[in-house]
Amino acid sequence: MKAEIFLPDNYTPADDEPFMNDLQVEYFRRKLLTWKSELMSDSKDTIETLQDSTRAIPDISDRASEETDRALELRTRDRQRKLVSKIESALRRIEEGEYGYCEDTGEPISLRRLDARPIATMSVEAQERHERREKVHRDD
């Protein structure tokens, strides 16, 4: 079992410290866990709202509006489910010691990118190359 790492409340990863040191890893682990917890809570609220709103609405325009809202809510929920899956994948990479490194090049992903998008699996440059290749193949 790993020792508990003390993470100061005001800690922010910095470029002048060793990449993916224990503090940085713990910072991103906690950030991912908090994000996952928030998404799971939102998901629970969504399910409760959808269950509460299963009532007969006599007015056709009100019913249409309710169905539109429900469809939007379900799409949002699906996006959240996919995001939770990506968060779990990032947490697995942390456990395996692979977090923070580009899956394409093996190079470190910038701390700014990871802070903004902690589920990132590629550096900005590798992601841009990947998207350009995707676009070329889509245009064929």
Image (cartoon, rainbow, N blue to C red):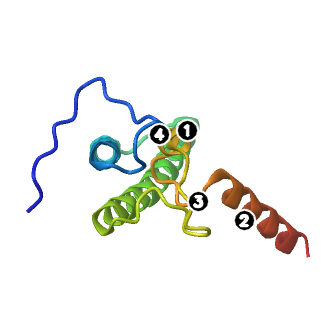
> Secondary structure beneath disc 2?
helix
Q: Earlier in the sequence, mark 4 or mark 3?
A: 4
Q: Which callout, 4 or 1, points to the residue nearer the camera?
A: 4
Q: Amino acid at mark 3?
A: Met
Q: Is residue 41 left or right of residue 140?
A: left
**Quick one: quadrant of the N terminus?**
bottom left
| Distance Cα–Cα, label 2 vs label 4 | 21 Å
Residue 30 is drawn in which quadrant? top left
Q: Look at label 1 and name its amino acid.
A: Ser
Q: Which of the labelled discs sits on residue 65, or is there none?
A: 1
Q: Amino acid at mark 4?
A: Asp
Q: Which mark is residue 122?
A: 3
Q: Which residue is mark 2?
A: 130
Q: Which residue is mark 4?
A: 115
CA distance for labels 4 and 3? 13 Å
Disc 3: CA contacts within 10 A as few (<14), some (14-19) or many (>=20): many
Q: CA distance from mark 3 to mark 1?
A: 40 Å
Residue shown at 38%/64% (left/top)? 89
Q: Are marks 2 and 3 in contact (CB under 8 Å)?
A: yes
Kindly check if marks 1 and 2 are in contact, taking CB atoms under 8 A apart as contact.
Answer: no
Element at label 1: helix
How far apart are the alpha carbons under marks 4 and 1? 38 Å
Disc 4 packing (10 Å; few <14; some 14–19; many ≥20): some
Label located before the other in sequence (4 or 1): 1
